[in-house]
Image (cartoon, rainbow, N blue to C red):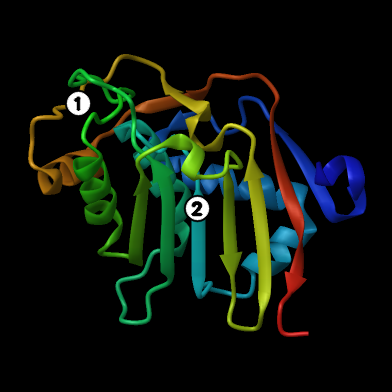
């Protein structure tokens, strides 16, 4: 919508295979590619650590999507007392059966929320909201970042963090306690690839909220 109505306020980026590879390098590849496409974004990121980050996406329901989100956001991770505030909004899955693969959904939203919190809490002041029904959360999938000087940038991801798939089958033990699931998820090593050709992302022109 922004691209069509106000093209001067939005940079459209098409992602093909640029981000494929080891999950450990996914975050660095993501930001490197986006910075090469948007001077706006690079200027904001060069300011240093943000004060707050918000990610909203109905479909952060599987261990794979959670790990992808972690890799994208870990650029801003810190173990100091002034860690960045991180807010994650998502929804529960209608899944009824217990999964066995990394890309399967949690069937219990309590476990889903606990794993998200356990994975991020060492590096961010994190809060997680899991809505019971999809219509309670906007369909828009966005990453919003704010800095102390008032600058704010938003990245709209057409497919959220669900654009990745593993190159080979990867199992996951959903029977473990949430803390153990988070530890296991953080330690997993696997390769990922974009499952959609020319996936669009939209980088909105930064605003300055203190003016």
In the figure, 107 relative to 144: above or below? above
- In percent of width and height, residue 182 lies at 20, 45
Q: Quadrant of the C terminus?
A: bottom right
Q: Quadrant of residue 108?
A: top left
Q: Residue at x 13, y 49 (%)?
A: 179
Q: Say few, some or many: other residues with alpha carbon within 10 Å of mark 2 (under 14 / 14 to 19 / 20 or more).
A: many
Q: Is residue 48 left or right of residue 209?
A: left
Q: Quadrant of residue 85?
A: bottom left
Residue 117 or residue 19, whichever sits in front: 117
Q: Is residue 45 left or right of residue 1?
A: left
In the drawing, what numbered circle is on residue 172?
Answer: 1
In the figure, 45 relative to 26: above or below? below
- In percent of width and height, residue 78 lies at 36, 70
Q: Say few, some or many: other residues with alpha carbon within 10 Å of mark 1 (under 14 / 14 to 19 / 20 or more).
A: some
Q: How many marks?
A: 2
Q: Residue at x 76, y 47 (%)?
A: 37
Q: Residue at x 41, y 32 (%)?
A: 22
In the figure, 54 relative to 135: above or below? below
- In percent of width and height, residue 118 lies at 22, 54
- In percent of width and height, residue 190 lies at 33, 28
Mark 2 sits on what residue?
55
Q: Residue at x 70, y 24 (%)?
A: 198
Q: Which is closer to the viewer, label 1 or label 2?
A: 2
Residue 45 or residue 141, whichever sits in front: 141
Q: Quadrant of the N terminus?
A: top right
Q: Quadrant of residue 106?
A: top left
- Compute the Cα span from label 1 to label 2: 24 Å
In the drawing, what numbered circle is on residue 128?
Answer: none
* Label 1: element kind: loop
């Amino acid at each position: 919508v922004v691209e069509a109505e106000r093209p001067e306020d939005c940079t459209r980026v098409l992602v093909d295979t640029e981000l494929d590879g080891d999950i450990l390098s996914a975050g660095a590849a993501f930001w490197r590619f986006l910075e090469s496409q948007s001077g706006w974004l690079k200027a904001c990121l060069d300011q240093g650590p943000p004060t707050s980050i918000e990610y909203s996406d109905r479909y952060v329901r599987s261990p794979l999507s959670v790990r992808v989100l972690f890799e994208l956001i870990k650029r801003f991770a810190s173990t100091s007392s002034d860690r960045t505030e991180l807010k994650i909004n998502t929804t529960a899955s209608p899944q009824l059966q217990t999964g066995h693969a990394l890309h399967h959904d949690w069937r219990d939203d309590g476990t889903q929320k606990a794993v998200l919190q356990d994975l991020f809490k060492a590096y961010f002041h994190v809060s997680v909201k899991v809505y019971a029904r999809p219509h309670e959360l906007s369909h828009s999938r966005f990453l919003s970042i704010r800095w102390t000087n008032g600058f704010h940038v938003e990245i709209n991801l057409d497919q959220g963090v669900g654009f990745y798939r593993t190159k080979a089958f990867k199992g996951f033990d959903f029977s473990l306690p949430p803390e153990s699931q988070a530890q296991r998820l953080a330690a997993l090593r696997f390769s990922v690839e974009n499952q959609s050709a020319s996936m669009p992302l939209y980088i909105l022109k930064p605003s300055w909220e203190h003016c």
